[in-house]
Image (cartoon, helix red, strand yellow):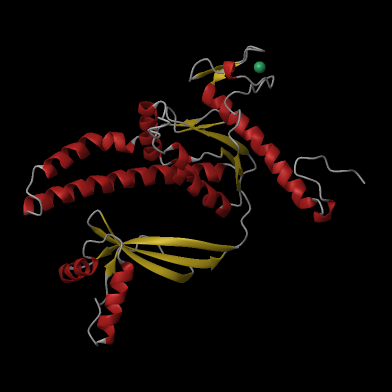
Amino acid sequence: MQRLQAFKYELRPDGQQQRQMRRFAGSCRFVFNKALALQKARYEQGEKKLGWLRYRNSREALGTVKNVTVSLSGGKWFVSIQTEREVEQPLPQSTTAVGIDMGIARFATLSDGSHLEPLNSFKRHETALRKAQQAMSRKTKFSNNWKKAKARVQRIHFRIGNTRRDYLHKATSTISQNHAMVCIEHLQVRSMSKSGAGSTEKPGTNVRAKSGLNKAILDQGWFEFRRQLDYKLAWNGGYLIAVPPQNTSRTCPACGHVSKDNRQTQAQFACVECGFEENADLVSAINILRAGHARFACEVSDAVRSPAAGTRRGEPVPAD
Ligand SMILES: [Zn+2]
């Protein structure tokens, strides 16, 4: 299989190169196009290139280089090299399947009973960020002190991003190495994180709660979590299965009874039919795993069935 992979390195420009790169970059943050055009023009005029740049060789870039991106983040320069290479179709090291429920109180609850604590990287740095932003607002704009204060704000943002990325990568690596199939809800993170304010004719409900949820969702990085799980599972020979979220939180895993009364509180599930009790997030994760198994079976039988049969998905396969 073809594997597209990006390798990112920190660049180590010297003073002269830094000044040149800054001049290229201007006020833009991602500038490779502009920088490249300028670079090309200079080169055609016979001027020297930036010359050779030092970089931190944190790991080896494998494959054919497809494109190269230079970026500035948190006052540091990076080069990201995207490559393509042929790798053997991997076989999963594990045969287990797991369902994952994403949440606020727990970042992720796995159907095997384990869970991941919430990330809250933003919350942890919130005070420092607020202070730095206030300090910046008190400075005269574009003064040297303002620039220093601005750099500080950027450094905190950079740290927040790093903490989050690190956390997500560790979590998704562990999960994708330990399971061959991971089932997750189809969550419209984007629409969930939309403003709850609504319009003047139709004002939104729970504006305050939704704004809190927004912040939490964006801080958690659910979208990024899914993206990483998806490609890491593929690299390990596994599958990510997304299932519709209908009733995953209301269905009793013991007797199958579906009712919103099964969820009297946010945290606890208690079946009104058979009395089964369990942590609500774990119940959702179990239901997600079941839905994922059903979906996977459907897809496999769809693939096996001849296309001429014309049966719709989910219908029993006629026996010959
Ligand atoms: Zn029940």
Identify the residue at image location x=77%, y=45%: 312
Identify the residue at image location x=21%, y=39%: 129
User: With respect to residue 312, does 36 lie above or below?
Assistant: below
Q: Which of 248/84 is in front?
A: 248
**Which residue of the protein is positioned furthest toward the bottom in this rendering?**
46
Identify the residue at image location x=14%, y=39%: 134
**Which residue of the protein is positioned furthest toward the right in this rendering?**
320
Q: Position of residue 5 (x, y in %)?
A: 47, 61
Q: Which of 270/238 is in front?
A: 270
Q: Please indicate, yes or no, whether residue 4 appears anywhere in the rendered image.
A: yes
Q: Position of residue 80 (x, y in %)?
A: 37, 63
62 sits left or right of 30 in the view = right
Residue 21 figure quarter: bottom left
Q: Position of residue 311 (x, y in %)?
A: 81, 46
Identify the residue at image location x=51%, y=62%: 4
Which quadrant does the N terminus fall into? bottom right
User: With respect to residue 193, does 76 lie above or below?
Assistant: below
181 sits left or right of 83 in the view = right
